[in-house]
Image (cartoon, rainbow, N blue to C red):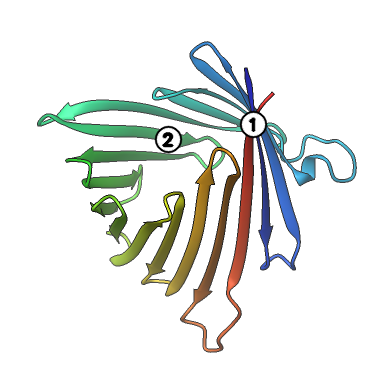
Amino acid sequence: MMKASVKARYETEKAASATGGATIAFNAGDFKLRASMTDATIVNGPSLNGLALGVEKPGSFIFDYNVPQKDFRFQFMNSIKVLEKPLNLNYIHFRGDNRTILDGTLVFDSANKVSANHVLGSRGCKLKYSYVHEGLTTFEPSYDTTKNSWDFAVSHKVYGNDVCRATYQTTSKNLGLEWSRSSKLNGSFKVSASVCLADEELKLPKLTAETSWDFDI
């Protein structure tokens, strides 16, 4: 059975203009095939602008192709055991800017995990620790060795399907708040607001709203 997903996005920072997109995906044996487009694909007549194609084998690899830019991204995934603990590995390559990312997450238990992210050719990496308290509240401090800076995130589950999240970036002094809900029956949505505390003048926060619906065809 074919799976379809429709997504829409609205940002106040872009002159109160709405942007939208749609993705259609279906299963082909062990693979998932998908095609996605943005409003640029349809506005002013059908075109290849914003059109992307993808092939995925869950837990193994993802291949994405940007049609108008003739650019691709591929990701390989694997999992091994280290001291009887699962280590999830990702190898991601962007052809356009010739950038390769290595990412690994060591899961100690259901509440504790440590991850590291490194861009090949750079001298630093990003380290993150995640702790889930009583299955409801997640604390995620992260450290960037290149910038010598800390970022912090805290999220909390409320009413079952709702999650409230707060983030703070110490280098840019950006404060973010987010509320999201995931429901198989009523679709999913996310509303977020961010503001830069480093600005001398207090500006209105940037607001973003996203919503998506999944259904069978």
Q: Is residue 154 left or right of residue 46?
A: left
Mark 2 in CB contact with mark 1 (< 8 angstroms): no
Seen in the image, is 210 located left or right of residue 77? right
Q: What separation in Å lies between label 2 and label 1 (alpha carbons)?
A: 29 Å
Q: Locate the N terminus and report the quarter of the image it occupies.
A: top right
Residue in front for this viewpoint, 206 or 94? 206
Single out the residue that lies furthest toward the right.
45
Indicate the quadrant where residue 150 lies.
bottom left
* Depth order, front residue of 168/189: 189
Give the SS element for disc 1: strand
Identify residue type, mark 1: Phe
Image point (66%, 68%), residue name: 13
Q: Nearer the viewer, residue 112 or 161?
A: 161
Query: Relative to 207, does residue 200 appear above or below in the rendering?
Result: below
From the image, tell me which residue sits under label 1: 215
Query: What amino acid is labelled 2 in the image?
Result: Ile
Q: For this rendering, which residue is in front, 40 or 212?
A: 212
Mark 2 falls on what kind of element?
strand
The residue sitting at 62% across, 53% down in the picture is 210
Image position, residue 83 (x, y; %): 9, 31
Does label 2 or label 1 sit earlier along the sequence?
A: 2
204 up-or-down from 80: above or below: below
The answer to whether any part of residue 69 appears in the image is no
Against 125, is 78 above or below?
Answer: above
- Which residue appears farthest toward the top when viewing the image? 29
Q: Residue at x 27, y 53 (%)?
A: 128
Give the label on residue 92, or none: 2
Give x and y (percent) for residue 169: 39, 68
Report the disc number at residue 42. none
